[in-house]
Image: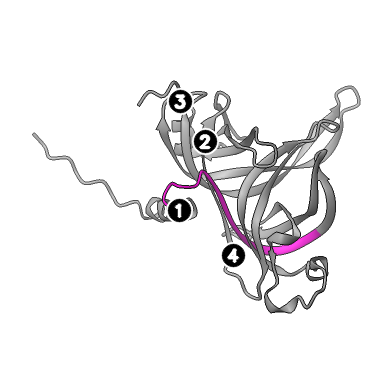
Amino acid sequence: MKRERDKKPDFLRDINTAIMEELTAGGIKDNAAGLAGELKEVEEVTELCGLRFNGYLAKVETPRPRGTLDEVIVAFTDGKVDVGQQRDGRPIKEFLTEGSKVIVSGIVQTLKDFESGKVLVFILADFLAMVKNPMMQDDVALRGVIAHEPVYRTTPRGKRITDISVMVKNELTGNKCFIPCICWQEQADEVAGWQQGDTVELLGRYQSRQYEKVIDTDSGSRERRTAYEISVQLINRKELAGNES
């Protein structure tokens, strides 16, 4: 009988596992995000998708390893902003200048705007600080339930993709929210066979992409939109639907 060969070490998986453990405090947190980038388009708001929220909505640009910029939506309040010793009684909004480098920690959330039908995918910050030279970061760790059957597809360029929606707690409403996640290649092949109701944990990055949506099928008119989702780097199935192990 031939002895099985040892599997090759998977250093990237080990690194991603360590990042996920750090973000989730060893599995204590079900939802965590760490981000560093450049502050863009800061807007003072009194609501988010019709829900009362007195704070700010901003875009933070953060680069992918190959240089492409992702646009991350961040919501935060005055009490979550750390300006160190510089405040001197001035309002927080004076410090929120576009182009500032920031670090952010928080959780990923979604809210639906029932007037437009659009879904806002954003990081609800529990900490935001301006820094001079942050080490670029874009990490999201989630533990939740697959809300719908996975959707498997192949892109025109031949890449294999599985889309899933991961259900987590909505911290603003107390209900549930659904985080769009996208798996690639071998992970897409595996996740395609999972089921609605399975519990998963994953590590990924918040990413944005441009696409065109057909507004009028008769005229063929289109509207350019931005999709926001979690691009999965590591995913594990922790429990099967129905709590079977």
Dot 2: element: strand
Q: Please tell me which residue is depicted at 53% across the width and 29% down the height of the picture.
A: 146
Question: What residue type is disc 4 on?
Answer: Met
Magenta span main SS: strand
Identify the mark nearer the N-term, 2 or 3: 2
- Residue 165 occupies quadrant: top right
Residue 168 image position (x, y, % from top left): 58, 36
> What kind of element bears circle 1?
loop
Q: Residues within 10 Å of mark 1 (few under 14, many from 20)?
A: few
Cβ atoms at labels 2 and 1 below 8 Å apart: no
Q: Amino acid at mark 3?
A: Gly
Tell me, yes or no, whether the highlighted magenta stretch contains residue 29: yes
Vertically, is 130 above or below 67?
below
| Residue 136 numbered mark, or none | 4
> Any magenta on residue 167?
no
Q: Residue 186 location in percent, x, y?
A: 44, 38
Residue under label 2, please give it: 144
Dot 4: few (<14), some (14–19), or many (≥20) neighbours within 10 Å? some
Amino acid, disc 1: Ala
Q: How is the image coloured?
A: one colour
Residue bearing mark 3: 193
Q: Which residues are magenta?
A: 26-41
Which of the two discs, 3 and 1, labels the residue nearer the N terminus? 1
- Residue 53 on image: x %, y %: 79, 47
Give the left or right position of residue 152, taking residue 93 as reference.
Answer: left
Residue 145 can be seen, yes or no = yes
Of the numbered discs 2 and 1, the one sitting upstream in the chain is 1
Q: Nearer the viewer, mark 2 or mark 3?
A: 2
**CA separation in Å, label 2 and label 3:** 17 Å
Residue that badge 1 annotates: 25
The amino acid pointed to by label 2 is Gly
| Circle 2/circle 3 CB separation < 8 Å | no
